[in-house]
Image: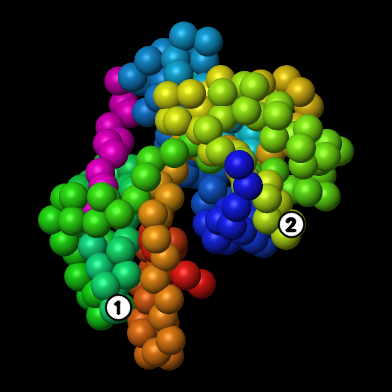
Amino acid sequence: MSGHSKFANIKHKKEKNDAAKGKIFTIIGREIAVAVKEGGPDPNNNFKLATVIAKAKANNMPNDTIERGIKKAAGDVGNVNYEYVTYEGYGPNGIAIIVDALTDNKNRTAANVRSAFTKGQGNVGTPGCVSFMFDKRGQIIIDKEECDLEADDLMMTALDAGAEDFNEEEDSFEVLTDPDGFEEVRKALEDAGIPMISAEVTMIPQNYVELTDETAIKNLQKTLDMLEDDDDVQAVYHNWDE
């Protein structure tokens, strides 16, 4: 059940080196607000909220901050007007890009996303134009240095909990689940005392594309940087082999 997963390693490095914790907390705060509005403030009866809380904990958001966010959202349900929107498109050399956003102004967000693609010599496509190149999976990343279990023991713990796959990287482990089984697996690992540096339902490329042209790399990085800096953007997925 082991193999090479570039995405896991890239994700791990991003999480370990990401200094923009302020934006991450803002992103998660919006997700909490929407989840509470849709399903109530009790994570035991609200799967979406439970999933967002797991993401918050994996990003080291303090428990009191999470609780305050839930209480604020519960008392402000009528004023929560964020909605999810997804954009798909192509970067240089046909690199597939998916952008998930949570916005209170779709016109603003659409204009910003289109600008990011255009300035990187790419273009926004129609819904479904690249999503078929990705698989929606639950993904949990565990730092080897923080995990006391041996690889085989960790793998068996994950598989017994319902995980579909287990990959070992140089510095991390990746646990993959069916999206519907993600929360059950995540909770089992949490109950086992296994520290997670990332735990979320995400989009994983089926194949990766390598870029060798320096101009193409520069343009793609420009697009990705602009998207990452946009406050409305929740997540960016791509199949670039970095």
Residue at the spot of label 2: 171
Binning the other alpha carbons within 10 Å of mark 1 as few (below 14), some (14 to 19) or many (20 upward) gives: many
Residue at image coords 30%, 64%:
96
Residue 74 horizontal/vertical position (percent): 44, 17
Q: Quadrant of residue 108?
A: bottom left
As drawn, 159 above or below 133 = above
* Of the pair 127 and 64, the residue shown nearer to us: 127
Tell me: residue 17, above or below residue 107.
Answer: below
Residue type beneath disc 2? Asp
**In magenta segment, residue 125:** no
Which is nearer the N-term, disc 2 or disc 1? 1
Q: Real-space Cα distance between discs 2 and 1?
A: 30 Å
Disc 2 is placed on an element classified as: loop
Determine the secondary structure under disc 1.
Answer: helix
Q: Is residue 236 left or right of residue 4?
A: left
Residue 77 placement (x, y as % from top left) = 35, 20
Q: Amino acid at mark 1?
A: Pro
Picture residue at 64% right of the left edge, 22% below the top: 160
Residues in magenta, as a range: 74-88
In the picture, the disc for residue 227 is none
Frontmost of labels 2 and 1 is: 2
The x, y position of residue 149, in whole percent, is 83, 36
**Which one is nearer the viewer's eye here, 88 or 160?**
160
Q: Give the residue number, with chain letter if any, for mark 1.
A: 92
Which residue sits furthest right? 148
Q: Nearer the viewer, residue 168 or 211?
A: 168
The residue lying furthest to the bottom in this view is: 214
